[in-house]
Amino acid sequence: MSHHPSHLTAAVPRRAVVTGAAGFIGSHLAHALVQAGAVVIGVDRRGPATDPTAAANLSVLQGLPGYMHVTADLLSCAIEPLLVEANAVFHLAGIPGVRPSWGPKFSEYVASNVLATHRVMEATSRMGVPRLVVASSSSVYGPTDGGASIETDRPQPASPYAVTKLAEEQLCLAHSTQAHCPTSVVALRYFTVYGPRQRQDMFTHRALTAALTGRPLRLYGDGHQRRDFTYVDDAVIATVAAATIPTASGVINVGGGSSASLLEVINIANSLSGREIQVHQENPRSGDVLTTRANPGRAHEVLAWRPQIDLHTGMRAHMQALATGSAAYGHSA
Ligand code: NAD
Ligand code: UGA
């Protein structure tokens, strides 16, 4: 299976800016856009020269004439010059973890997820870019009864991280409702994305790494928590569609492919590796919800998008990337 959606069928913006391009989802998105013929400026405060994860994530883009990387902090850099003639801005930069958002790190979440977003939104609007796609999160829904979350549900964020993601999307949407704002905003609520180059703090990466190395896996809680696991190529296809499809501003769930518990993820990792993961159970962590599940209707209706990759297929590709240890797929340590 290919590790990037080279088969993007929707139109792509001619010229795009991807913030957070040195990150997990951003690097896949930038690569897919360039492969499909777009010119992409990637902006990230991590750069390949100084940050090994950024270098690994960006290595697929290295040398591609359609890609330029700008190492800059969106809290302070001049954003407008980067947006000249851009047809779309994809704003994926942010601090992503749920559990570390309690305590002193919260100010970093506010800085990157809210204050930097405010700067990106203002610059995008001032430069007359017609579309901003912003990365929101399934975590804005908070605890549910296990049923599917629909975009019109009242958000009940259960972690400081989720509060900042809700602020981020609503801030952009508030700007877009201003009469003079030339930018329409599509906020994508991604549901637990996995695949090659996934962040090392995330569960699928850790389960597959435990299966490959024999090192123990720390399980927070009993493993019955469920996620609507979304393969990164699927997330990228939805994200590109969100930039080009004519639609009013709003939020859209990008989730699914497989609803599964953590115990099922462990079982798949076991069967793919032929090795039994050693599980160390710990207490559940604050801010985690028991279940996320996307109502997929609006994504289908607006983006003509349905996830294609089931968890077993996606985890096989993710594991292969880790096993080959290719720099292109990040570090497995
Ligand atoms: P990631 O950490 O791999 O990528 C985020 C990137 O943003 C990093 O490279 C980081 O250096 C950059 N960044 C942070 N603050 C910045 C700033 N002030 N200026 C410039 N760059 C900055 O995370 P990811 O998993 O790829 O997530 C991307 C986005 O999607 C995030 O906004 C996250 O909240 C959101 N999201 C991710 C998931 C998921 O499952 N991975 C699910 C829902 C939402
Ligand atoms: C993920 C992303 O990390 C967030 O950036 C994103 O906003 C969120 O999805 C989303 O859908 O919006 P999360 O669902 O917490 O957040 O994903 P993981 O970090 O992979 O954790 C999944 C579950 O595994 C959680 O219950 C967590 O407590 C558990 N876990 C994680 C462990 O048991 N052990 C670990 O070592 C790591």
Image (cartoon, rainbow, N blue to C red):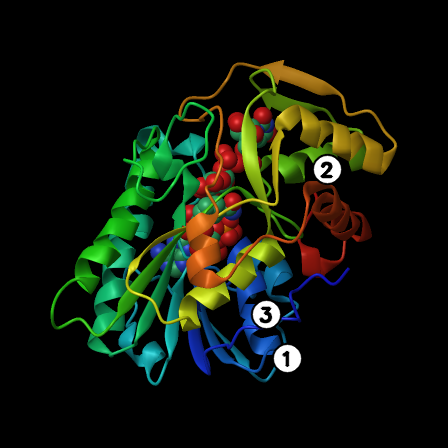
**In the rendered structure, are the residues bearing label 1 and label 3 in contact, judged by CB atoms less than 8 Å apart?**
no
Mark-to-mark CA distance, 3 and 2: 25 Å
- Local secondary structure at mark 3: helix
Q: Is residue 71 visible?
A: no
Beta carbon at label 1 within 8 Å of ligand 1? no
Q: Position of residue 217 (x, y in %)?
A: 68, 25
29 is higher (above) or lower (below) than 17? above
Number of residues whose C-alpha sits closer than 10 Å to that of mark 1, classed few (under 14), some (14–19) or many (20 or more): few
Mark-to-mark CA distance, 1 and 2: 30 Å
- Of the pair 325 and 167, the residue shown nearer to us: 167
| Residue drawn at (20%, 75%) of the image | 126
Q: Which residue is mark 1?
A: 63
- Local secondary structure at mark 1: loop
Q: Position of residue 260 (x, y in %)?
A: 62, 32
Number of residues whose C-alpha sits closer than 10 Å to that of mark 3, classed few (under 14), some (14–19) or many (20 or more): many
Mark whose residue sits in front, 3 or 2: 3
- The amino acid type of the residue labelled 2 equals Leu
- Label number found at residue 32: 3
| Residue drawn at (65%, 40%) of the image | 205
Mark whose residue sits in front, 1 or 3: 3
